[in-house]
């Protein structure tokens, strides 16, 4: 089994249909497959072996997709890194995954050059790098069949979690990604006639599996934007061809501001929002104005989509994350791993072909992530209603999801602590209409010191990817604590919201 | 995971849509689910525990479905037996399956007497049985949720193979059937608006997994017939009550003789044929006259149906299609080594659709799997350079006639019980109507004569009717290998060549 066979099949059934559109670029399935074959054979020629990691660190593009499938076809593992990573975030992950080759863009070249290391990173594929992707394609051959892999071999590694401790490189298998892509294609009733708008990053599980892989599997077309840009989104929508729209709450809110919304959306038939915390009135307004329900799902990098809410519009339960995806099992368990009854709150645990194999080179992290029998622990607290709809009650890991990106508070807190005037701090996510959640920092300054928000913000901006930088700074004289001295984040959140 | 959750979800999403249509009466999903809940709770009240074996031996009906899902909801294992089993076959399988309860028809009561007693069947559910189906329903309540099972717990056991040796009860798990139902619903683009014609028996993997479970999953309606009846089939299609037509080659051939086929088929959007041996000209004529492809699939009981599918996008006549999502096929040689594309070898399968094993038959289970977990289909095939699979031969000499499986050895053993028989060989001959027809070659003992009429009526009393050969050919010698094994392929070739 090789995930890239989905591309080969789409190229076989629909060679002349468009796989990717990006501005003026149009790539048919035959062309995309041909390019991937060239990249695969090119990579093999420069010594890439089945099972070894090959990196991608670039914004969304047709080349990204061709390279990704080229890596898979060669039997290698695609290590997909966010192009927003900088400094130690980037070097930690590159040093951990140890790819010999990384596909990137000139913008990242300088930084990545510094990470080259004999026996480690050797080659950078970008226009001004060791070889351009076009040069790599020229080296290869357009005719090639994906190397067969075991279904449990790793296809892609997606990093989750921050820069503290050993990085968590989630190993997703050929079977796992295939299973999830197929589940999504089924729920979304995707066909070769669909055109999916994609501005969410391919390095993230949502962009890579939910949007990209499931579109390639169902032979649809990806309308690519390198990143979110409202004007471009409107332009593309107004061109009147998009049938599937994937976005985060903020985008839906902005679109609701348009007076001629229905006209703008044209043949759009399906809408999906990544974040679980979609405000109820947005879903309602959207439905009223467009007739389309915004479907949602709950997922995580370690298990891809877990629940789905919902294809059948009349059963979309606002505030819930929906029912378990077909073939996926969810149990609510207590702290010792015992399954709880329906209606009780506990940790959401997941089993199925969608669940990751392990964290790369991190046996401790892997061990802690699973209960016996292959149940992965989400770290989130959930509850089922009598109809099998899951609701998220709380996030154990304090994960913040803002505009579809994951932010781990600890990582931001560590950056804050490196600012000399900070005595104590706590980073939390507060509900936000636009972003789902927004990152907020609560800070106790050192005695006698004053902290200027702008100064602190600039300090963080130089150290963190922009989406991780808190939007709001609350200076306080003390933080609520447990008797053991642990900062009580739930309490902070509650006080702030009530206050 | 419980397979019956598919029914619960359909009842939740579409309580008022029809789940079953039978004799012009429709039963809604809400009703079907409530009735299944009654069965589940009644069974539990009567002491049925998760993992207990409950049998079904009756023609297709809405009661059959209610019992099936009721038993699954209670966490029990359903053993689905053909209603066409001869008395001997029936007794053998009932004994092997270790049934606690049996849902059946009144005609079986006689043969059940000796199967009672210690460790045997405790309760028979049928008119004049220990309790009627209505009495069972009356003991239960309509509100219940399917008990959670492990994904690798057995949901259903389907018997395959003959009456010789230890029976092969294929243990299909909740996950197995779920995966296949989902694959079928995806491949067929099934929705709640579909109406699937089902006259093929639920005890068979095709009727049970491919048609019934996939339809329940996608919240469509099952248009039920207890068995094949040409007039009723035509009536349902003409009335516009069928969007998906599931059939066998013989029925397609007969429908092609009808005038006005085009108008008659106005509501049908999808056609599927179970047998792999659909003649090329039928597919062509059908496409010409109705504009529809006849899709085909390859599957075994052990694979919970769908392994390959031919095909929603690109139908290749003569092939059985490409693998369905998540299912892998390798062509292997007799030692289990993988062969190259284009080479002929045994079709081996890996996926979550593959059975857990044969019930209480570890030897057969061992033989069915390579040590790396790949299942051996026993069929010989090869892939073309577009990854379409072709079947060359059936390693096990299995005959598929009118959608039913016939195992030659089983028929041969019965024939050998006649004193006049020296040697015999049962094979399947290509048949436009039946896909294959059962034929027997007979070498009588010296000086002995047996007429085909005598033999036929002898066999009819001992075998299910579809297993009884249609053709009887007396020969003066059997072609044999140096080791003395009858060469069936050679027999077949001679006969076909000789009859032009």
Image (spheres, coloured by chain):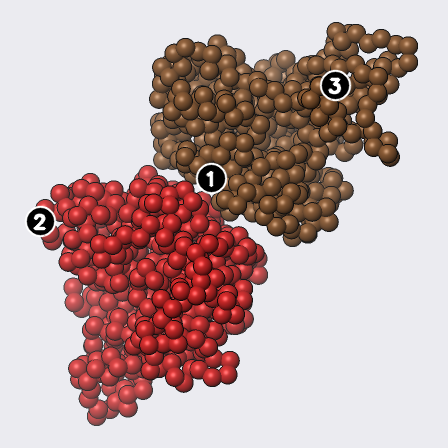
Alpha carbon distance from label 2 to label 3: 78 Å
First-in-chain label (1 vs 3): 1
* Of marks 2 and 3, the one in the foreground: 3
Helix, strand or loop status at disc 3 = strand
Residue B381 in the image: state x and y as whole percent: 39, 56
| Chain of residue at mark 1 | A
Residue plotted at (33% across, 45% down): B17
Disc 1 crowd, CA 10 A, few/some/many (<14, 14-19, 20+): many
Please say if B411 is above or below A362. Answer: below
Pointer 2 residue: B259
The image's mark for residue A182 is 1
What is chain B's hue in the picture? red
Pointer 3 residue: A441
Residue plotted at (16% across, 67% down): B499
Q: Nearer the viewer, residue A339 or A288?
A: A288
* Of marks 1 and 3, the one in the foreground: 3
Helix, strand or loop status at disc 2 = loop
Q: Nearer the viewer, residue B29 or A75?
A: B29
Q: Which of the image's four quarters has the C terminus of chain A?
A: top right
> Is residue B494 something one can see in this rendering?
no
């Amino acid at each position: 089994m090789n995930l890239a066979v989905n591309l080969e099949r789409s190229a076989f059934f629909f060679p002349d249909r468009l796989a990717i559109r990006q501005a003026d670029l149009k790539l048919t399935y035959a062309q995309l497959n041909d390019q991937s074959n060239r990249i695969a054979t090119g990579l093999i020629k420069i010594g890439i072996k089945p099972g070894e990691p090959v990196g991608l660190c670039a914004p969304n593009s047709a080349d990204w997709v061709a390279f990704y499938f080229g890596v898979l076809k060669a039997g290698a593992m695609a290590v997909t890194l966010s192009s927003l990573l900088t400094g130690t975030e980037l070097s930690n992950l590159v040093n951990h995954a140890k790819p010999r080759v990384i596909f990137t863009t000139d913008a990242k070249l300088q930084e990545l050059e510094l990470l080259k290391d004999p026996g480690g990173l050797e080659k950078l594929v970008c226009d001004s790098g060791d070889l351009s992707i076009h040069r790599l394609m020229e080296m290869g051959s357009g005719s090639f069949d994906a190397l067969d892999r075991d279904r449990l071999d790793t296809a892609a590694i997606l990093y989750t979690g921050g820069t503290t401790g050993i990085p968590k490189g989630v190993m997703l298998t050929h079977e796992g990604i295939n299973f999830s892509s197929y589940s999504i294609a089924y729920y979304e009733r995707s066909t070769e006639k669909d055109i999916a708008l994609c501005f969410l990053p391919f390095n993230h599980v949502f962009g890579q599996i939910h949007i990209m892989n499931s579109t390639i599997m169902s032979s649809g077309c990806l309308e690519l934007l390198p990143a979110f840009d409202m004007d471009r989104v409107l332009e593309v929508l107004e061109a009147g061809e998009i049938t599937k729209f994937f976005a985060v709450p903020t985008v839906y809110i902005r679109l609701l501001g348009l007076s001629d919304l229905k006209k703008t959306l044209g043949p759009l038939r399906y809408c999906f929002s990544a974040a679980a915390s979609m405000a109820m009135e947005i879903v309602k307004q959207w439905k009223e104005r467009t007739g389309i329900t915004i479907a949602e799902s709950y997922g995580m990098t370690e298990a891809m989509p877990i629940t789905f809410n919902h294809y059948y519009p009349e059963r979309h339960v606002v505030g819930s994350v929906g029912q378990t995806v077909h073939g996926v099992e969810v149990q609510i368990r207590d702290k010792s791993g015992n399954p709880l009854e329906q209606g009780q709150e506990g940790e959401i645990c997941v089993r199925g072909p969608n669940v990751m194999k392990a964290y790369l080179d991190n046996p401790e992290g892997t061990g802690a992530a699973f209960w016996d029998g292959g149940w992965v622990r989400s770290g989130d607290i959930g509850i089922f209603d009598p109809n099998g709809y899951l609701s998220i009650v709380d996030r154990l890991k304090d994960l913040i999801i803002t505009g579809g990106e994951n932010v781990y508070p600890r990582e931001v807190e560590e950056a804050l602590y490196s600012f000399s005037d900070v005595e104590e701090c706590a980073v939390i996510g507060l509900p936000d209409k636009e972003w789902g959640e927004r990152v907020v920092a609560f800070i106790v300054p050192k005695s006698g010191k004053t902290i200027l928000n702008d100064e602190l913000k600039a300090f963080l901006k130089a150290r963190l990817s922009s989406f991780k930088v808190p939007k709001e700074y609350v200076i306080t004289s003390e933080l609520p604590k447990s008797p053991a001295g642990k900062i009580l984040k739930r309490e902070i959140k509650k006080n702030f919201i009530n206050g | 995971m419980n397979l019956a959750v598919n029914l619960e979800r359909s009842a939740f999403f579409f309580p008022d849509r029809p789940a079953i249509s039978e004799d012009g009466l429709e039963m809604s999903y809400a009703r079907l689910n409530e009735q299944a809940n009654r069965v589940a709770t009644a069974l539990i009240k009567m002491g049925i525990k998760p993992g207990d074996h409950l049998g079904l031996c009756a023609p297709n009906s809405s009661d059959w479905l209610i019992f099936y899902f009721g038993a699954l909801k209670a966490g029990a294992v359903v053993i689905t037996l053909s209603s066409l089993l001869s008395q001997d076959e029936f007794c053998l399988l009932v004994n092997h399956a270790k049934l606690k309860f049996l849902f059946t028809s009144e005609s079986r009561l006689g043969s059940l007497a000796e199967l009672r007693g210690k460790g045997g069947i405790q309760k028979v559910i049928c008119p004049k049985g220990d309790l009627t189906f209505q009495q069972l329903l009356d003991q239960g309540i309509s509100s219940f949720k399917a008990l959670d099972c492990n994904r690798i717990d057995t949901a259903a056991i389907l018997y395959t193979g003959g009456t010789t040796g230890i029976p092969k009860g294929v243990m299909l798990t909740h996950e197995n059937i779920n995966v296949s139902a989902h694959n079928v619903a995806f491949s067929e683009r099934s929705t709640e608006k579909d109406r699937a014609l089902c006259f093929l028996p639920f005890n068979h993997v095709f009727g049970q997994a491919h048609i019934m479970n996939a339809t329940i999953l996608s919240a469509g309606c099952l248009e039920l017939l207890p068995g094949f009846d040409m007039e009723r089939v035509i009536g349902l299609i003409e009335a516009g009550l069928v969007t998906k037509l599931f059939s066998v080659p013989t029925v397609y051939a007969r429908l092609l003789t009808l005038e006005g086929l085009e108008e008659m088929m106005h509501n049908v959007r999808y056609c599927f044929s179970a047998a792999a041996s659909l003649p090329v000209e039928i597919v062509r004529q059908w496409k010409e006259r109705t504009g529809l492809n006849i899709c085909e699939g390859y599957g075994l009981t052990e694979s919970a149906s769908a392994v390959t599918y031919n095909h929603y996008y690109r139908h290749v006549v003569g092939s059985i299609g490409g693998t369905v999502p998540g299912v892998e096929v390798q062509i292997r040689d007799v030692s289990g080594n993988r062969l190259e594309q284009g080479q002929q070898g045994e079709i081996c399968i890996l996926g979550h659709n593959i059975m857990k094993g044969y019930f209480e038959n570890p030897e057969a289970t061992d033989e069915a799997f390579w040590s790396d977990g790949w299942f051996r289909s026993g069929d010989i095939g090869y892939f073309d350079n577009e990854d379409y699979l072709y079947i060359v031969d059936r390693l096990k000499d299995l005959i598929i006639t009118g959608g039913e499986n016939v195992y030659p050895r089983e028929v041969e053993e019965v024939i050998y019980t006649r004193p006049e028989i020296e040697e015999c060989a049962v094979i399947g001959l290509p048949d436009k109507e039946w896909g294959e027809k059962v034929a027997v070659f007979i070498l009588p003992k010296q000086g002995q004569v047996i007429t085909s009429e005598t033999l036929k009526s002898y066999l009819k009393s001992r075998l299910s009717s579809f297993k009884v050969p249609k053709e009887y050919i007396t020969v003066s010698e059997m072609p044999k290998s140096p080791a003395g094994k009858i060469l069936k392929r050679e027999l077949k070739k001679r006969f076909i060549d000789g009859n032009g």
